[in-house]
């Protein structure tokens, strides 16, 4: 497994906003990210189909007992939002980098993070 994609990086990929491609490899997402992508309020049927095709290229990590336990501990110790704690715990359990541009997550002790390079607006 090459890395875990946070929701913001998944959205950047889908929106063509990456300045440089992610390194080749196999990527995963948390079930939380899957749900966030599919539950976007203004998602059209065509966009939903595109998201579903994107998701088929990734491994979706379900909530195991160890991920749940770690997420609860992260939430309690570091005051991160529960969905973020689940995503962080998933990356930590998989022992992979979390691709995220969320600066608050980069401060979680023990979490390896990597930011995506974005195309700058003109």
Image (cartoon, rainbow, N blue to C red):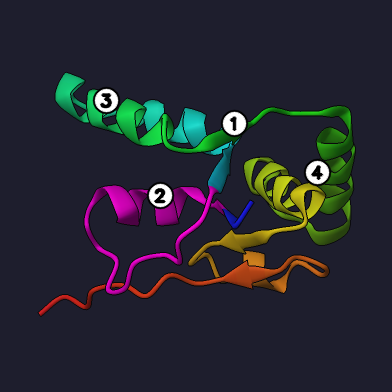
Q: Nearer the viewer, mark 3 or mark 4?
A: 3
Q: Is residue 77 left or right of residue 92?
A: right
Question: x, y (%) of residue 61?
Answer: 65, 33
Q: What element carries label 3?
A: helix
For image coordinates 43% across by 70% down, the residue present is: 116
Q: Residues within 10 Å of mark 3 (few under 14, many from 20)?
A: some
Q: Which of marks 4 and 2 is nearer the N terminus?
A: 2
Q: In front here: 75 or 5?
A: 5
Assess whether mark 3 and mark 1 are in contact (beta carbons under 8 angstroms): no
**Mark identifier at residue 10:** 2
Estimate the spatial distance between the alpha carbons at disc 4 and disc 1, rounded to whole Å.
13 Å
Q: Is residue 60 left or right of residue 14?
A: right
**Mark identifier at residue 48:** 3
Q: In which quarter of the image is residue 16?
A: bottom left
Asked if residue 64 is among those painted magenta in the image, a careful observer would answer: no
- Determine which residue is flagged by label 4: 71
Q: Residues within 10 Å of mark 4 (few under 14, many from 20)?
A: many
- Determine which residue is flagged by label 1: 31
Estimate the spatial distance between the alpha carbons at disc 1 and disc 2, rounded to whole Å.
13 Å
For image coordinates 78% across by 54% down, the residue present is: 92
Estimate the spatial distance between the alpha carbons at disc 3 and disc 4, rounded to whole Å.
28 Å
The magenta region covers: 4-26
Q: What element carries label 1?
A: helix
Q: Quadrant of the C terminus?
A: bottom left
Q: Which of marks 4 and 2 is in front?
A: 2
Estimate the spatial distance between the alpha carbons at disc 3 and disc 2, rounded to whole Å.
14 Å
Question: x, y (%) of residue 90?
Answer: 72, 45
Question: x, y (%) of residue 2?
Answer: 60, 57
Q: Does residue 39 lie above or below 32 as drawn?
A: above
For image coordinates 32% across by 54% down, the residue present is: 13
Q: In this view, does 95 lie to the left or right of 119?
A: right
């Amino acid at each position: 497994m090459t890395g875990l994609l946070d929701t913001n990086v998944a959205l950047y990929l889908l929106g063509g906003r990456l300045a440089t491609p992610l390194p080749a490899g196999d990527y995963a997402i948390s079930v939380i990210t899957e749900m966030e992508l599919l539950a976007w309020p203004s998602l059209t049927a065509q966009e939903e189909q595109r998201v579903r095709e994107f998701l088929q290229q990734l491994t979706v990590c379900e909530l195991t007992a160890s991920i749940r336990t770690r997420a609860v501990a992260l939430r309690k110790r570091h005051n991160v939002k529960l969905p973020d704690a689940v995503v962080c715990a998933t990356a930590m359990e998989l022992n992979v980098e979390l691709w995220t541009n969320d600066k608050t997550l980069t401060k979680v002790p023990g979490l390896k993070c990597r930011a995506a390079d974005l195309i700058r607006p003109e």
